[in-house]
Every structure is written in C-alpha cells, then in structure tokens.
Image (cartoon, helix red, strand yellow):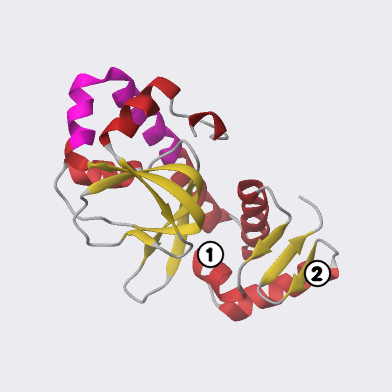
Amino acid sequence: MIDQLPGLQISKPLLESLLKEGTVKVLKPNTVIIDENDYIRNVPIVLSGTIKVFKVDEEGREILLYYIKPGESCVMSFLGAVCNGTSKIRAVVEEESKVLILPVTKATELIRSNPAWLEFIFQLYNTRFEELLDVVNAVVFQNMDDRLWELLRKKVVLTKSNEITTTHQQLADELGTAREVVSRLLKQLEKKNKIQLGRNRITVSEV
C-alpha cells in the first residue's frame, strides 16, 4: 500500500509508524470528514483519493480552500485539535478515498517522540499557507472565468482524467458564486472548444 502512494510527501518510515497508531478506512464521495464547529478527535492522512477543504459563511456560501492529496493531511484540523478548539473548516471526500485516521492523542504524542512527524507538520503548514494565499489572490485579483478554468484544470490534475464528474452547482459552491454564473461561463468555454458539457460531466479538451 505504501509503495502505491503517488506524489508522496510523507516519508515511508514515518507513514509506517503512523499506520501502527491509526486505522485505515475507505470513504465514499461526499463523506464529511470534519465539519465546522466540531471538536476534532482525529487527524486524517490521505493514502489515496482526494479530500476537499472549504469554508462556509453565515449565508451558507462555500469557498474552496485546498485539496488534501495522497501523502498529505489536514494541518488546520491538527492545529485546532492541539489548541483544543473547534474546527473552522469542512473537509469532504471528493472521490473514493483511503484515509488513515490518526487519533489526536497519538498525533500529539508523536510530536514529542518522532521528529519526522513534527517536520512533516511544519512542511504541510507551509504548503497550506501558500495555497491559502493563492485563494486570496484569486478572489481579489482574478476574474471568475479565470478562477473557473483554473479549478477545472486542478481537478484534471488531481483525478488524472480529462473527464470530471461534477455539477454546475458544485462548481459554483466551490467558487463561492451562483450556479447561473458558472453555467454561463461553462457555455463560453465550450464555444471556445476548451470543454465539452454532458450530464453531470465535463470533459476538458485542453489543460
């Protein structure tokens, strides 16, 4: 299982240690791993598949923050658990995923006993910070059509497939905009031959 992890950030020796402390589960799409305002009991480490992390405002609008890819974890959940606080984000399974569920008590103990785990947390925190800066930059400076195209490209890279299974509403939720806006922009992309639209499916012609 360890040898099959693509884009592995976590080292194999560290992962082997973590596997002894946690439980591996296979989770279906749309499974909520962490919800907002929940007390965090476990830290998820993705072995395969993808988990998306987003923020929901008071009006129920969502904005995608980042994806957790194989070999990565949700550092925001870990930091919240260490501070004994509640979650400020929601993490949902994007595609069927194999996830190592590590109890928070074990995760905090490993900080003291395993320097490689602490180094992994710091590296992951730096990665997530850069991704959040990218989100801020996109929201403030990019047009919605550019943000939509970038999201489609990112999904192609993550799934390693030019065919994306999603709805216009799901894309709108991830971008924090209206479905009508996304539908209009997708039609424009189709006219430019960049994508082909189907029922709950988008085929990206170029990346």
Pick the front one: 134 or 72:
72
* Residue 205 higher or lower than 116, as above or below: below
Q: Give the extent of the magenta segment.
A: 106-129
What label does residue 19 carry, if any?
none
What label does residue 190 carry, if any?
2
Q: Which quadrant would residue 143 be assigned to in this image?
A: bottom right
Question: In the rendered structure, which amino acid carries the disc numbered 2?
Answer: Glu
- Name the residue beneath numbered marker 1: 175
Q: Helix, strand, or loop for circle 2?
A: helix
Pick the front one: 182 or 112:
112
Measure how far apart labels 2 and 1 are at the Cα level. Answer: 19 Å
Q: Are marks 2 and 1 in contact (CB under 8 Å)?
A: no
Residue 121 magenta: yes
Instruction: Name the side, left or right, on which 34 lies relative to 175.
Output: left
Q: Residue furthest left?
A: 84
Q: Earlier in the sequence, mark 2 or mark 1?
A: 1
Q: Residue at x 56, y 75 (%)?
A: 169
Q: Residue at x 43, y 67 (%)?
A: 62
